[in-house]
Amino acid sequence: MNAIIDKLVVDRPEDGLFKVHRDVFTSPEIFDLEMTHIFERTWVFLAFEGQVARPNDYIASWIGRQPVLVTRDKAGTLHGFLNSCRHKGARLTTRECGNSRLFVCPYHSWSYAPDGKLKSVKDKSTGHLPPQFDGEDYDLAPLARLESYRGLIFGSLSADVPPLADYLGGARALIDLVMDQGANGMELVPGRTVYTYGANWKMQVENGMDPYHLTSAHQSFMQIVTQRNARASDLSKIRSRDFSRSVGAEAGALQFSHGHGAVWITNMTPEQKPLYDDIEALVARVGAHRAQWMLNFRNLVLFPNVQLADSESLILRVIRPIDVNTTEMRMFSLAPIGEPAESRALRIRQHEDFFNVSGLATPDDTAIYEEMQAGLAATGAGYQRGYDRGATLLGDGADAAAAGAGIAADASLTGPFKLQSEMQYQPIYREWKRLMAPAFEGVAA
C-alpha cells in the first residue's frame, strides 16, 4: 500500500493502533478523490423500491456528484440512468419523484421513455441533420450496474463491482431484521426530511452507529424523556426510550467487509416500540429469538451512503456529499405495511421526537458535526484517535450473541452498554483505504 494512504489511515492492530488523519475530513483534494474512487467505483444506495412501485414511477437520486434517474418502465422493469439529456446535458427532471410516461428535456424538448429510449427529437425533419445522425446511440446513458436487495435499490457507475448480495455480505441479516418486521412488507411513511449540515459526510457515517456520544450530546433528550415518563400527561404516551433503563443493558458491535458496520443494544423496554403492539403475531411469524432482535436497538451503516437505524424509531437515512464541508441528509420513516393506526401514530410521534430536524436529537448531532469540522481546522493536532473503545474484546467472526441471530460478521464483540464500542468504525476506513489506494499509486509520500 502507498505510504501516503498508510499515513492517512494508520491501521496496525498488532500494535493496538488505529487512527485517521484530519486531512481525511478537511482536504478538498481528498474529497474530490473520494467522489471518483469511492462513490463512482462501488455500490451506492439510490432508492427504496416502494418509491418506484408502479409502472412509469421514477425517482431522482445521486451517485456522489452525478445525477441519477431510477425508473420503472411500463412493463415493470427497473432501470437506472444518468439524469442527463444526450443533446445538451440538462437534467431531464428536477422533481424528486413522480410518475411519467415521458421525460422531456426542458432545454430543447428531446424526449425519453422510462426505459431510457430516445422517443423524439424536436423538429428533426427540418434540421438537415447528417445521414450519420440516425446511426448514433442517443438513448439515456445507463448505470453500469443496478440491483436491489429486500427493497433497497443500489447502483454503480462501475461494472467492476461484486454482486450486490456479496457486497452486502453478512450485513444482509441485519437488513432482513428490518424488512421482515411487516407481514405484508415494509413501506416508507409518507413524507421525508431533507437538510444539510456544514461538515464532512463521514461524520454522519460514524455517528449513525455511535453509542459513545449518546449520554453526552443528548443529555437534554434523556432528561426530558425521564421527566415526562414520570408524569401523567399526553406527552408520556410517546414512549421514547427510557435511557436510565438502557445503561445496564448488554450491547455489541459488528464488523463486516466492504466498510459496513453495526451496533446493537438489548432493549430493556421493548413495550415502548410500535412493533411490540402486535408482539404475539410477530413471534408466531418470525420466532421468539428474531422477534427479540427486531425489538432490540440496532444501527446499521452500509458504506458509503445509507443507514438503517432502528432505535428511537426505524429510519432510512441517505447521505449525499456536496463538498468537503457540506453534506445533504435525506431521512425517511420505515414501517410495516398495514400496521395498526395506533402503532403508526406512535411511530410518527417517536420519529418526530428524536430524529426530525425539529426534534430533540438531530439538531444536537448536526451542531456537533459543525463544531468538529471547525475544530479539525487545528491541523497541528494531526490524528483522530476515536477508534479504540472495545479493542481488547474484539474477536474474529460472530460472537455468540450475533451468531444466535444468524449474523455472519467478520468480527464482533459483546459487553455492557457503558463499553460504548468504537470498533464498528474501523471497516469504514479499511474500505476507504482499499478504494482510495489507486488514487495515490506512484505518488511520492
Image (cartoon, rainbow, N blue to C red):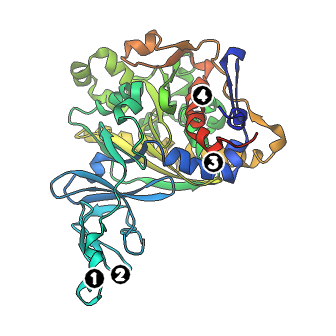
Query: Closer to the camera, 366 or 239?
Result: 366
Of marks 4 and 1, the one in the foreground: 1
Asked whether disc 2 touches disc 1, contact meaning CB atoms under 8 Å apart, the reply is yes
How far separated are the C-alphas under marks 4 and 2? Answer: 49 Å
Q: What separation in Å lies between label 4 and label 1 (alpha carbons)?
A: 53 Å
Task: State the image coordinates of residue 436 (x, y, percent, origin top left).
Answer: 59, 40
For the residues bearing labels 1 and 3, Cβ distance under 8 angstroms: no
Say which residue appears at 79% left-offset and 37% top-offset: 382
- Position in image of residue 285 (x %, y %): 22, 22
Q: Which mark is residue 426?
A: 4
Dot placed on the residue nearer the N-terminal end, 4 or 2: 2
Q: Is residue 360 visible?
A: no
In the picture of the structure, the residue carrying the numbered disc 2 is 108
Q: Could you give the CA–CA distance between mark 1 and mark 3, rounded to whole angstroms?
A: 43 Å
- For marks 4 and 3, the one nearer the N-term is 3
What is the C-alpha distance between the residues marked 2 and 3? 37 Å
Mark 3, other Cα within 10 Å: few <14 / some 14–19 / many ≥20:
many
Pointer 4 with pointer 3, Cβ within 8 A: no
Please name the residue shown 44% across and 9% down the image.
400
Mark 2 residue element: loop
Extreme right residue here? Answer: 380
Q: Amino acid at mark 1?
A: Lys
- The picture places residue 314, in percent across and down from the top left corner, at 40, 37
The C terminus lies in which quarter of the figure? top right
Q: Earlier in the sequence, mark 4 or mark 1?
A: 1
Residue 177: tell me if it is visible: yes
